[in-house]
Image (spheres, helix red, strand yellow):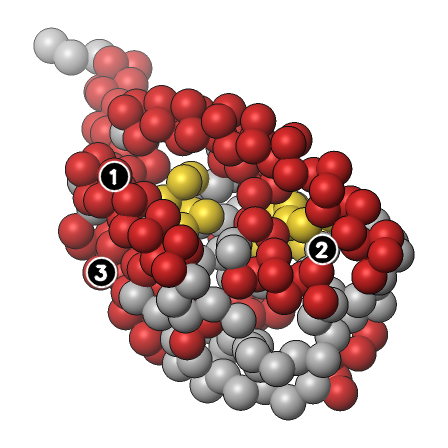
Amino acid sequence: MTSPIHLHQRNIGLLSLGLKRQVHPSVVSKTKRILDIFGAIVGLALTGIIAVPVAIAMQFDDPGSIFYSQVRCGFNERPFKIWKFRSMVANAEQKKHLVENKAKGHIFKNENDPRITRVGRFLRRTSLDEFPQFWNVLKGDMSLVGTRPPTIAEVAMYEAHHFERLKVKPGITGEWQVKGRSEVLDFEDIVRMDLNYQKQWSFMYDIQLIFRTIAVVLARKGAC
């Protein structure tokens, strides 16, 4: 006869198993994590190389910090600090209300944003501003490939179906990068692409998106 203690332990085990099954496979994939670590190490090495000329160029263009950080929402709405090379003037957040939002929905975009510096526009066009995010990948807050990392303010305005996109780790790149980058101006389009990524995900699909991202960046398609 099974004791109450054994029944309780079995129920806890079944509950834990059920919770694990609810987690998207990309979040617990060991091969994806190995790819992230390897890619992050290579990416950070490149970041260290380009950081010096970027810092020098910034001091001539718009003196200030070389890096920009912002709190974003990651997997399961977990907040984390994202890092980028600064592409806007030092007091950009205070001037945001002066810029017209050309996007639709819970995102903010304006390809002619006057807050973007000359160096910043080059960094964005070549996606070099994203390189410090390899540190986020190494820490495990992000992945090389995933969904677009939203801001806290964006998530505060989410409707129920929008939270589905937070069931995987955010990525440096993803479907939104290879299918338009800054030309995607409708938030619902980004949501559809993020959910499609979750449905199609596999290790080889990540590899495919990485190579497609490299091709898009080199061609400078859809960049600000």
Label 1: state its secondary structure: helix
The quarter holding residue 144 reads top left
In the picture, the disc for residue 124 is none
In the rendered structure, the answer to whether residue 33 lies left or right of residue 129 reads left
Where is residue 135 shown, x and y percent of the image? 58, 34
Structural crowding at the residue carrying mark 3, measured as other residues with C-alpha within 10 Å and reported as few (<14), some (14–19) or many (≥20):
some
- Which residue is the extreme one toward the left? 1
Could you tell me the amino acid type at mark 2? Arg
Name the residue located 25 percent from the left edge and 39 percent from the top edge.
Answer: 207
Provide the residue designation for mark 1: 207
Where is residue 198 shown, x and y percent of the image? 24, 52
Structural crowding at the residue carrying mark 2, measured as other residues with C-alpha within 10 Å and reported as few (<14), some (14–19) or many (≥20):
many
Name the residue located 37 percent from the left edge and 60 percent from the top edge.
Answer: 219
In the picture, the disc for residue 86 is 2
Provide the residue designation for mark 3: 196
- In the rendered view, tell whether residue 70 sits above or below residue 190: above
- In the rendered view, tell whether residue 69 sits above or below residue 92: above
Compare marks 1 and 2 and give the one earlier in the sequence: 2
- In the rendered view, tell whether residue 11 sits above or below residue 218: above
For the residue pair 91 and 163, the one nearer the viewer reads as 91
Compare marks 3 and 1 and give the one earlier in the sequence: 3
Could you tell me the amino acid type at mark 1? Ile
What whole-number distance in Å separates the C-alpha atoms at marks 3 and 1? 16 Å
